[in-house]
């Protein structure tokens, strides 16, 4: 048996919980460190980069879940570790005023747990989806779970921002405790009994040593170029992640709750962009994947230019600009996922899993590097320039990276045929 649509939706709830816990570290806790505690933005940037670095263990978790006979325990166990890390990360923020080293020590442990939890739970979940989903439903399953994750991020960011007013350390711990415990409980209910009712299939090439397969794929020009595109575009995608809320607080005077609530329109816009792209490409067959990837990159660049300009003019349009950035980021993300799926089967022996793993590793490295680079640049420029100019310069650099990614997309995605694009059609 393979996964039913209801079971796919239940697994999507696990992705929703992953997004709900992780967004706390990249939005609320990041803002509190930089604005309320006056810590350098590079500190949360390094912590988030550290948790992305820990996620390079994803291949190991995938191998363990393959050999362990059941992926459910890794999905649920990883979520429990992630929840513990999320709560400890909030505790670290609360402890910083009492002692920097104490807060830093707790935070380092917390972000290590977050990286391990996301790696164990997320990788095992994707492995279960890949091996237990009927071939005709895999693209739709990937899109459903991705959108549910974005939905979890958007709802959590908006809800936490609302309940965090007025801010206090005790209130922060209570809210984070509810979110993390809720994530574990929902995951346990969502995953219960699914794996026992399906038959998981091993993919081709399982006997080949991992490093040998990876070396062969890196030797393929198309796979190598797309890896570089993923790294460049995802670096641009994540550069603003750790500076957007401090920007709102320092330049526009947003309160902690107001800046946290920015995640609502941002991720809501991303959700809408993903839906528009998925429907246009899959159902209506409007445009090619290359056109949508390029359009998403160009639109994201324009939105970042708007963010930089708003800081100079003081116009009260930050929320619409952030929503526009999310919308074009969503277009780019879904189109890039579609291109990734279309290219995964290209090359020798159709090693889809290994290629997806390579591109996933490139994304993890870019996410950590991009967030850290954005925070470090903002810190350095704020020593030389007023806050609006400093943050605006970082946004313009990010826009430039998106423009470079758009040029790369035009060159390397031209060979994707519409018959491969059609693989995005649910059930096709």
Image (spheres, rainbow, N blue to C red):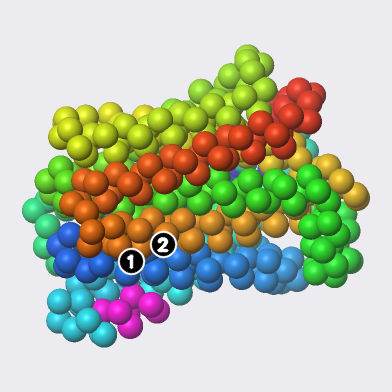
Vertical placement of 174 versus 6: above or below?
Answer: below
Determine the residue positioned at 17% across, 33% down: 313
Q: Nearer the viewer, residue 122 or 369?
A: 369
Question: Regarding mark 1 in the picture, which secondary structure is present there?
Answer: helix
Give the Cα distance between marks 1 and 2: 6 Å
Q: Position of residue 212 (x, y in %)?
A: 85, 67
**Bounds of the magenta span?**
103-109
Q: Nearer the viewer, residue 398 or 243?
A: 398
Residue 326 bears which disc, if any? none
Q: Position of residue 200 (x, y in %)?
A: 77, 53
Q: Position of residue 115 (x, y in %)?
A: 49, 68
Q: Are marks 1 and 2 in contact (CB under 8 Å)?
A: yes
Question: Regarding mark 2 in the picture, which secondary structure is present there?
Answer: helix
| Residue 105 lies in the magenta-colored region | yes
Residue 372 bears which disc, if any? 2
Residue receiving disc 1: 42
Q: Nearer the viewer, residue 212 or 94?
A: 212
Determine the residue positioned at 22% across, 62% down: 383
Q: Is residue 291 left or right of residue 179?
A: right
Determine the residue positioned at 68% across, 51% down: 227
Q: Is residue 242 left or right of residue 171?
A: right
Image quarter where the C terminus lies is top right
Q: Position of residue 83 (x, y in %)?
A: 40, 66
Vertical placement of 243 versus 309: above or below?
Answer: below
Image quarter where the N terminus lies is top right
Q: Nearer the viewer, residue 232 or 122?
A: 232
Q: Is residue 265 left or right of residue 385?
A: right
First in residue order: circle 1 vs circle 2: 1
């Amino acid at each position: 048996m393979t996964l039913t649509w209801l079971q796919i939706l239940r697994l999507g709830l696990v992705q929703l919980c992953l997004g709900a816990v992780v967004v706390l570290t990249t939005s609320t806790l990041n803002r509190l460190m930089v604005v309320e505690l006056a810590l350098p933005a590079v500190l949360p940037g390094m912590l988030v980069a550290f948790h992305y670095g820990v996620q390079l263990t994803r291949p190991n978790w995938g191998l363990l879940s393959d050999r362990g006979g059941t992926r459910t325990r890794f999905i649920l166990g990883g979520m429990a570790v992630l929840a513990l890390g999320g709560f400890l990360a909030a505790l670290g923020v609360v402890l910083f005023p009492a002692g920097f080293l104490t807060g830093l020590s707790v935070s380092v442990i917390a972000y290590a747990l977050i990286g391990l939890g996301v790696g164990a739970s997320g990788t095992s979940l994707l492995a279960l989806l890949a091996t237990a989903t009927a071939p005709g439903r895999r693209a739709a399953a990937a899109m459903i779970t991705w959108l549910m994750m974005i939905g979890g991020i958007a709802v959590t960011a908006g809800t936490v921002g609302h309940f965090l007013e007025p801010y206090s350390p005790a209130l922060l711990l209570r809210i984070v405790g509810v979110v993390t415990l809720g994530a574990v409980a929902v995951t346990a209910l969502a995953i219960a009994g699914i794996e026992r009712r399906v038959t998981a299939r091993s993919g081709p090439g399982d006997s080949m040593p991992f490093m040998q397969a990876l070396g062969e794929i890196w030797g393929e020009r198309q796979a190598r170029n797309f890896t570089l595109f993923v790294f460049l575009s995802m670096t641009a995608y994540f550069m603003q992640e750790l500076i957007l809320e401090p920007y709102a607080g320092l330049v526009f005077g947003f309160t902690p709750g107001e800046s946290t609530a920015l995640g609502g329109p941002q991720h809501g816009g991303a959700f809408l962009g993903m839906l528009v792209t998925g429907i246009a490409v899959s159902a209506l067959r409007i445009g090619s994947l290359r056109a949508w990837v390029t359009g998403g990159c160009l639109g994201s660049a324009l939105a970042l230019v708007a963010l930089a300009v708003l800081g100079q003019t003081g116009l009260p349009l930050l929320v619409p600009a952030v929503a526009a950035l999310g919308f074009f980021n969503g277009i780019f993300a879904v189109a890039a996922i579609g291109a990734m799926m279309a290219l995964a089967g290209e090359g020798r022996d159709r090693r889809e899993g290994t290629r997806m793993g390579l591109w996933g590793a490139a994304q993890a490295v870019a996410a950590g590097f991009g967030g850290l680079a954005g925070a470090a640049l903002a810190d350095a420029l704020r020593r030389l320039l007023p806050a609006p100019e400093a943050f605006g310069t970082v946004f313009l650099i990010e826009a430039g990276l998106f423009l470079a990614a758009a040029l790369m997309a035009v060159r390397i995605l031209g060979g994707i045929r519409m018959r491969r694009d059609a693989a995005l059609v649910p059930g096709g």
